[in-house]
Amino acid sequence: MSFKQCTSCAHQWQDQEEFLADPDVTLLGLQVCFDNLMEGLILFNHSCRTTFSVEVSRFGNLYQGPVYSERLTAGEECPGYCLNERELKPCPAKCACAFVREILQVIKAYPKKKRR
Ligand SMILES: [Zn+2]
């Protein structure tokens, strides 16, 4: 089974590396799932102009840093990024949701293959 298939043009990516390195794939946003952070959806644009999502859990291997247990959403330290689907910034709070945003940073900085 391939890593992901585009919901519109049916292009297939064989593995995570191929997917992240594809210059035709752009990171677009994040739909946080507060009940189960690993079930959140990371939104991508494909060059065929489709937006599709991949579950956070599929990228869990990209971040090995600390994961906090307490959720600080809407608290004093929370910048509210998780409430804005298009916000891609890392979170400065020691919040349970922060690791998902760290995964976004790895995806954002992933070296893209040159176009042929
Ligand atoms: Zn496509």
Image (cartoon, rainbow, N blue to C red):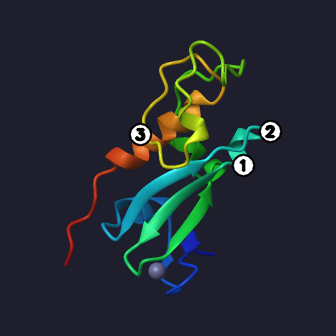
Q: Is residue 107 left or right of residue 95?
A: left
Q: Which of the two labelled residues, at mark 3 and mark 2, occupies the earlier sequence position?
A: 2
Which numbered dot is residue 35?
A: 2
Between circles 1 and 2, the one closer to the viewer is 2
Residue 30 position, x and y percent, is: 56, 49
Which numbered dot is residue 105?
A: 3
Q: Is residue 36 left or right of residue 67?
A: right
Separation of disc 3 and disc 1 at Cα? 18 Å
How many neighbours does mark 2 have within 10 angstroms: few (below 14), some (14-19), or many (20 or more)? Answer: few
Q: Which of the two labelled residues, at mark 3 and mark 1, occupies the earlier sequence position?
A: 1
Q: Amino acid at mark 1?
A: Glu
Residue 29 position, x and y percent, is: 50, 52
The residue under the point 35% across, 61% down is 21
Q: Secondary structure at mark 1?
A: helix
Q: Amino acid at mark 3?
A: Gln
Q: Is residue 21 left or right of residue 30?
A: left
The residue under the point 42% across, 77% down is 49
| Rendered image quadrant of residue 25 | bottom left
Which numbered dot is residue 91?
A: none
Between circles 3 and 2, the one closer to the viewer is 2
Separation of disc 1 and disc 2 at Cα? 8 Å
Q: Secondary structure at mark 2?
A: loop
Residue 5 position, x and y percent, is: 56, 77
For the residue pair 31 and 10, the one nearer the viewer reads as: 31
The residue under the point 54% across, 18% down is 93
Q: Secondary structure at mark 3?
A: helix
Separation of disc 3 and disc 2 at Cα? 22 Å
